[in-house]
Image: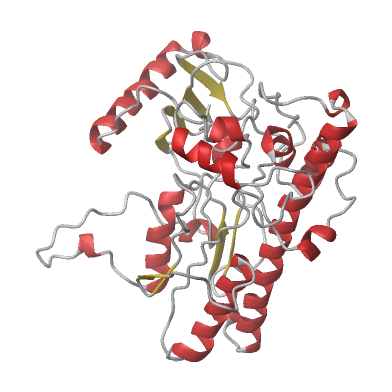
Amino acid sequence: MRPAYAPTPDVKANYSENGEKLSELPPEFAYSTQYYVDRMIGFLRDERDGERPFFAYLSFTAPHWPLQAPDDAIARQRGRYDQGYDRLAEERLARQKRLGLLPETATRSSRSPKERPWEELNQDERRVEIRAMEIYAAMIDELDRHTGRLVDFLEASEQLDNTLILFLSDNGPEGHDLDETWPMEAFPDIRRTIDAVHDFSFEAMGRPGSYVLYGANWANAGSPAFRLHKAFPTEGGSRVAAFMRYPRLIESARIESQFVYVTDVTPTLLEIAGVEHPALRSDGDVIEAPVGQSFIPLVAGRAAAPDEPRTVAQELLGKRAVRSGNWKLLHMPAPYGTGNWQLFNLAEDLGETEDVASRYPDRVRSLSEEWESYVRENGVIIPDWVSGD
């Protein structure tokens, strides 16, 4: 039960049940993904009134670092990534184009300062990189396998076609290494604890007590057309995989390219459930209204492209962005940015490679004003140092 960021060796992960922190894991807990699904199925089968609707939220720990997976799950991935991350990136880029997830004009994004061509690695470095990816893939495979058990249960209990299933990741691929994640100068207690109590040997990789991150090279292969990864407001860090299944509303499978934001999830689920948000009621209590917008008309095929582009601002660990339609304003420190606002046209430049701020100063000005409005409305405080860069 050791957490990923304990300041002392005796700290345990904050697992709780019904509001009570656990001193030890239940005997049936073999792996978090397995146990979460077991409990969800148990609730839907044994504890829920079958006539009432339910909301079930599965917030999986996998594939978060430190990367660990069951031995048999890792074994199933052996040899699949021996050709390296550059080959994998090219294969995935081509496949995403064939599937219609990317336009034919998409190219592989530029490398981050932490990325190295596969051909420059020696055999020992390649061996470690391959094993890290095998472990990560094993964690994804376990998530897929156990989620499938939940879907099978819903189907067997004749609930599947009356259940809305929404899946999304909370960020792009994780691309940091240990020094970026827990620099000694910023997190001395946590870093000392990590270094002291974990086994960093090759043989231990993926086992309990190991501490593995799969890094920027594989992160790029995971999202090959987009720049950078988790903790950056670039497309590589903020554009995520997501899908929705609800046969009562969605007649046939399709890919939707209109912009949807995470704040839209709550109003969407409320609309599906026919529930009014408390902030919209006149019961005397002041509750902040949701800031998103329902995407039910979009997935139902009833929404046309908006007349005016939607503008969304965001800040993450001191790095910030404003998006309006296909225009994106970015502010990041060197070596990832210039320390000033940069402007990119995503319609022509998915990889955010060409800064066109000097060609469109009026657009930079208007989007930076949107950022200032966002700061005032949300009380944003920019830290005096940028984490995770």
**Residue at image point 48% right, 13% down:** 360
Question: With 62 as the anchor, is 284 left or right in this view?
Answer: left
Q: Quadrant of residue 37?
A: bottom right
Q: Is residue 327 above or below residue 84?
A: above
Q: Is residue 219 above or below residue 42?
A: above
Question: With 10 as the anchor, is 87 left or right in this view?
Answer: right
Which residue is at the front of the view, 45 or 324?
45
Residue 318 rendering spot, x and y as whole percentages: 41, 28
Q: Quadrant of residue 227?
A: top right
Considering every residue shown, the one lying at the far left of the view is 284
Q: Quadrant of residue 171?
A: top right
Which residue is at the front of the view, 255 or 107?
107
Which residue is at the front of the view, 5 or 266?
5
Residue 109 rendering spot, x and y as whole percentages: 70, 28
* Total tally of numbered discs in the picture: 0
Q: Is residue 239 visible?
A: no
Q: Is residue 245 above or below residue 230?
A: below
State the scheme by which the image is colored. secondary structure
Residue 94 rendering spot, x and y as whole percentages: 82, 40
Considering every residue shown, the one lying at the far top of the view is 358
Q: Is residue 305 visible?
A: yes
**Residue at image point 79% right, 49% down:** 203
Which residue is at the front of the view, 125 or 51?
125
Question: With 148 as the anchor, is 7 left or right in this view?
Answer: left
Q: Is residue 132 above or below residue 166?
A: above
Residue 87 rendering spot, x and y as whole percentages: 86, 36
Question: With 223 as the anchor, is 338 left or right in this view?
Answer: left
